Amino acid sequence: MQSARKRRGNDLHTTTQNSTPGGLKEKVAQMKRQHFHCDLWFFLTLQNWILDFGRPIVMIILPLEWFPLNKPSAGDYFHMAYNVITPFLMLKLIERSPRALPRSAVYLCIITFVMGASIHLVGDSINHRLILSGYQLHLSVRENPIIKDLKPASLIDSFELLYYYDEQLGHLMWYIPFFIILFIYFTGCFTKVKEQKKIPVSGWLLLGPNSLYYWYLVTEGQITELFLLTFLAMVVLTRHQQRKGLSPDSNGLFLFYSFSVTALLVAVWVVYLWNDAVLRNKYPGLIYVPEPWSYYTLHVKKSR
């Protein structure tokens, strides 16, 4: 009798422990993490469009008198905000992953991301001022009229170094960690539960703007190879997980479909400008993907 009472008491104690408010909170938090993260995807898409894509547009629209050439422009302040808000949102996204992810790799990527974006901030700020002075984006540094006649000629090397920091090193340190973090997050987005594999209406509404921004990121950032490698890795991982009976959840599907639409948009962009001789000369090599702003200075700005 006493042993039976002890067992019932232990069972009651175990049940009480499992039903504590802390345990319930953990279960609720876990369920929330597995649902579609509409708030994070919305804020990421919104701030990407405003603070990144909208940055050069703001610099063009606002009067030059408001932001002298020797002071930060409105676009520079947008870039500063982007460098703070984006890594914060990506850390929040990693926190909501249903499985534990390598924290050290995430932190290292975030640090590199902020450093690369900051390098790009400085280079892009000066590059914009060159555009206001007549610099043409569809030409190389040495072919630009305002650059090739500089004296002494060694100044041209300095501008080429600036271009390297802005368009090459800054982009690599910015975008490589960005795509690594997205892929790391994607590795945790697999489940057997059918209810978690459906994208809600809010996700479908965000899919178009999110994919269009990624198209701008890939083309303007000249990171087609990086994007294709990340997309290929996502496809291979999905195939591998399907053999285990797992499929992407709603967040994983949203990310996968966004990359799929982005790949289609990049292909359409390349076909559209396939026979453009000037852009072909600016972007030689095996993979030909022109930058949208080069297209703007070559075809749109001249026609106005």
Image (cartoon, rainbow, N blue to C red):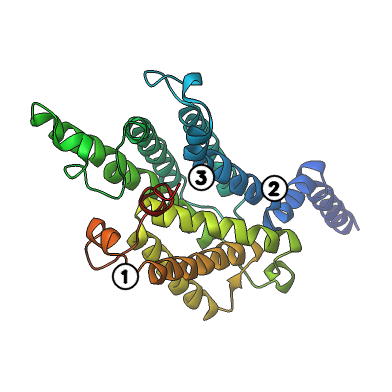
Which quadrant: the N terminus? bottom right
In the image shown, does 24 or 150 lie closer to the viewer? Answer: 150
- Say whether marks 3 and 2 touch (CB < 8 Å): no
Please, what secondary structure does the residue beneath circle 3 have? helix
Q: Is residue 195 rendered to the left or right of residue 42? A: right
Q: Which residue is mark 3?
A: 53
The mark nearer the N terminus, 2 or 1, is 2
The residue located at (51%, 45%) in the rendering is 53
Q: CA distance from mark 1 to mark 3?
A: 26 Å
Query: Residue at the bottom extreme?
Result: 243
Picture coordinates of residue 226 (x, y %)? 35, 59
In the image shown, does 24 or 256 lie closer to the viewer? Answer: 256
Q: Which residue is mark 1?
A: 275
Between circles 1 and 3, the one closer to the viewer is 1
The residue located at (25%, 48%) in the rendering is 139
Q: Which residue is mark 2?
A: 39
The mark nearer the N terminus, 3 or 2, is 2
Note whether residue 161 is visible.
no
Q: CA distance from mark 3 to mark 2?
A: 20 Å
Tell me the quarter of the picture where residue 295 sits: bottom left
In the image shown, does 247 or 270 lie closer to the viewer? Answer: 270
Please, what secondary structure does the residue beneath circle 2 have? helix
- Say whether marks 1 and 3 touch (CB < 8 Å): no
Q: 10 Å neighbourhood of mark 1: few (<14), some, or many (≥20)?
A: few
Q: Amino acid at mark 2?
A: Asp
In the image shown, does 198 or 282 lie closer to the viewer? Answer: 282
The residue located at (22%, 64%) in the rendering is 285
Q: Amino acid at mark 3?
A: Phe
Relative vertical location of residue 28 with respect to residue 81 in this rendering, above or below: below
The mark nearer the N terminus, 1 or 3, is 3
Note whether residue 267 is visible.
yes
The residue located at (37%, 32%) in the rendering is 132
